[in-house]
Amino acid sequence: MTSHRLDASLDTAVDVLTAERAPVLRAVDGDTVTVRTLSAAGYTRRPASPGADAPTLLDARRGHCLVGPIAVTGARPGQVLAVRFDALVPDDWGYTGSGGIDTELNRALGLADPASRGPLLWDVDAAAGTARNQLGLGVRTAPFLGVVGLPPEATGEHSTIPPRPLGGGNVDCRELVAGSTLFLPVTVPDAMLSVGDGHAAQGDGEVSGTAVECGMTTTMTLSLVDEVPVAGIHADTPAGRITFGFDADLNAATTTALDGMVDWIAGLYDISRAQALAMASVAVSLRVTQVADRTWGVHALLPHDAITGPDAH
């Protein structure tokens, strides 16, 4: 097992998910990788004022500014890539955009006009675990990466913007903090993982379309797994076990997340799916992961201490 280091540069940054680009790093099962990513926009320096633009690393800005792809040698479809987040340290500033973009949600809220923008610029204190903006308002930080993904197909360049049932990507789940492991079914040979879109803090839903967007230094351990407790993208986090659903239809996304959680509970406690659904009804919380990307994200959360009794399998 080896430790690697990657920094965002013109040689390592990418704004699409693709298996056709040469990997920027080759890791093996069990390796640890420390990655410094820029903000989603790829800003190379702090904006001068809230909402101001700043130089970016990539001119095209087709999607999130990520680092990748990282090849995990020997990974093959049928396996699962486990990404354990050992540490996540945000940069000392971040930004949040709000309003001014013509989306269905902004129109409903009366905030589609560009004159209605309400951007925030944040000072982030990673050691104190706080962020404070130009309004004098602060929040507690809980850093995580918004985008952790594999290409959905072996050919082509794929947008980083929508989360996908195949490959993950822009999952935007606020529970994926340090100590979490995200399980991604391998979609292409060598996995070809790309990561970025650091968030110092975010609420469920990411309702303005952005969180506290920031650069991030992430240390993660990459492992290959042949057997997992549930199919599809799922996670084990400090808050609990999580299953995900992604779809343009909120009902479909909800059903996928719940279906995975019912399977997980049934397997953990050796009970029927109907009994597992009943347990989910009293122990599981369904949350809207994000509404920002025109693909609904829903996650089902089972806290570790929510079910007591016979030990889980």
Image (cartoon, grey):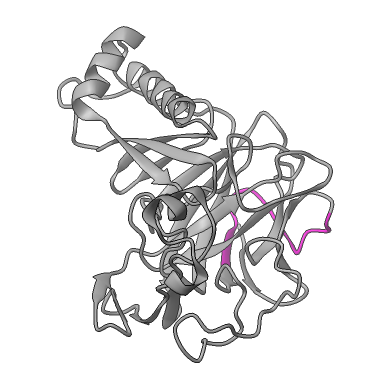
Position of the C terminus, as image quadrant, is top left
Position of the N terminus, as image quadrant, is bottom right
Using residue 44 as the reference point, say whether residue 25 is left or right of it. Answer: right
Residue 276: x and y in percent read 29, 15
Residue occupying the point 42% across, 64% down: 211
Q: Is residue 115 above or below residue 210?
A: below
Residue occupying the point 49% across, 66% down: 113
Residue 306: x and y in percent read 19, 32
Would you say residue 288 sits in the magenta stretch? no
Of all residues, the one furthest to the bottom in this rendering is 48
Would you say residue 29 sits in the magenta stretch? yes
Residue occupying the point 64% across, 33% down: 79
Residue 129: x and y in percent read 28, 74
Part of the protein shown in magenta: 21-34
Q: Is residue 280 above or below residue 172?
A: above
Let me know if residue 272 appears in the view: no
